[in-house]
Structures are given as structure tokens and as C-alpha cells.
Amino acid sequence: MPGQAGQRPDRQPEPENPYDGDRSSSFPPRAARPRGLHRPLLAHLPFAVLLLAGAVLRLMTWGAYRPALLFPDSRIYLLGAANEQLMATRPGGYSAFLWPFLHLHLGGLPSITLVQHLLGLAMAAAIYLLLLRLRVWPWLAALATAPLLLDSMQLSLEQYVKSDVLFEALLLGACLLLLWRRRPGAPLLLAAPGSASPSRSPPTWSPSTSSMGRSP
């Protein structure tokens, strides 16, 4: 109170600074927010360019080789899907993949190859997301997807009525199950190795194949 000697006048409380204290939980100033929001988008620009280039190449391939490229194995898979029969010489996973296109009138051969091209783009996106989750630099993760997006052999495989693209997608799915978490758990460890088996047959050995090329 005034009149009392030796007593300091009360100080006014200083305004709290919202950026003091725990810096991990504080927000940056408003002037810096736009820069922080645009930085992640610019970091993904290399992958966006590669993905666009891959989509254009697939569209050109799909339009140039319509309705589809066929291989001797293509007939076996198509007959298995049309007759709803499992072939003794080929696994039935790819025939099951072809079944809706033949029986539900989804467009036939052009739709099959179109879906396989979309699978190629989806696999590239999955690889990119996995590498980002593993804390790989965005430009390096984008570079890792370039062979899948731009390789001419991959484009031709997607245009063929063959089981290769489905096998690639299932194999990549198994890798995602194993690598997405640091500890995938016992069920995933048991399920992932056999996830791609319905579309590809394992290599076999027989005396006749081992003796090919040898003189008697």
C-alpha cells in the first residue's frame, strides 16, 4: 500500500508467450505456416512427374496394342476362366482373376489389360508409400519407382494376358504385409510367403528336364 516504506509496488504480470515452453507442441508463427504447408507437396513432385509419365506411357501402350497381346499361355488361362475349370498345368489364380471379365461382361480383353496397367501404377504408389514409411528421402523413393513406371518390358507385360502382373502385385502385397510394421506378427509371417502362390506355379525338377541339352 502507498505510504509504507520499503515495499515495492506490485508488478503487472507479463503476457504469456504461446511459443515458450514445449517447442514440440507449439505452432509456428502465422507467417511461416504457408511455407510449411507447401513443403510436403513440393517434396512429392518428383514422384508425381514419374507417375504422370507412367500413366501416359500406359495409355499409349493400351491404345496401340488393342485389344491385348496374347501368348500361348493366354489361351490356357482364358479357357480355364471361360469353362470355369482348373487347369492341371497352370495355377487357377489368374483364371479366377479373368473370370469376372468374361462372365460379367466387363469389357473383355481391353478391360483386362486396362486393369493390369492400373495395377502397375498402384504398385508404384505402394512402393513409394512404403519407402516413405521407412523414412527414405522422397526423391530417392521416387527414383526407386522409376523402373516399374517407365520400363518397356513392364509395359508389355501389363498388355499381355499373362499372370506376371498379378504375381507381381501379390508378391508386393506380401512384402507390404511384412515391412509395413516393424513387428508383423506370426499370422502375417505365415500368410505372406504363400500369398502369391495362386498365380504362379513353383519350379519343378524332373530327370527329363535336367538332362535336356546333354548328349547320351
Image: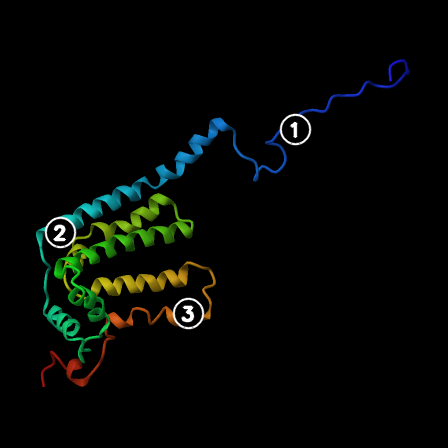
Which residue occupies 33% across, 54% down? 126
Indicate whether 16 appears above or below 53.
above
Q: Position of residue 12 (x, y in %)?
A: 74, 21
Residue 59, disc? none
**Residue found farthest to the front:** 104
Q: Which residue is mark 2?
A: 61
Q: Which residue is drawn at the image coordinates 28% and 61% (left, top)?
A: 169
Type of colouring? rainbow
What amino acid type should be assigned to the residue bearing mark 1?
Answer: Glu
Count of labels shown?
A: 3
Instruction: Give SS at disc 2.
Output: helix
Tell me the SS state at disc 3.
helix
Q: Point out the image quarter for the N terminus.
A: top right
Task: Quote the CA–CA distance across marks 1 and 3.
Answer: 53 Å
Quadrant of the rendered structure where residue 41 is?
Answer: top left
Residue at 15% across, 84% down: 208
- Labels 1 and 3: the sequence-earlier one: 1
CA separation, marks 1 and 2? Answer: 63 Å
Q: As displayed, is residue 151 above or below residue 32?
A: below
Q: Earlier in the sequence, mark 1 or mark 2?
A: 1
Q: Amino acid at mark 2?
A: Thr
Check disc 1 and report the residue beneath it: 16
Task: Please name the residue that numbered disc 3 is placed on.
Answer: 189
Say what amino acid the circle numbered 3 marks: Leu
In the rendered image, the residue lying farthest to the top is 3
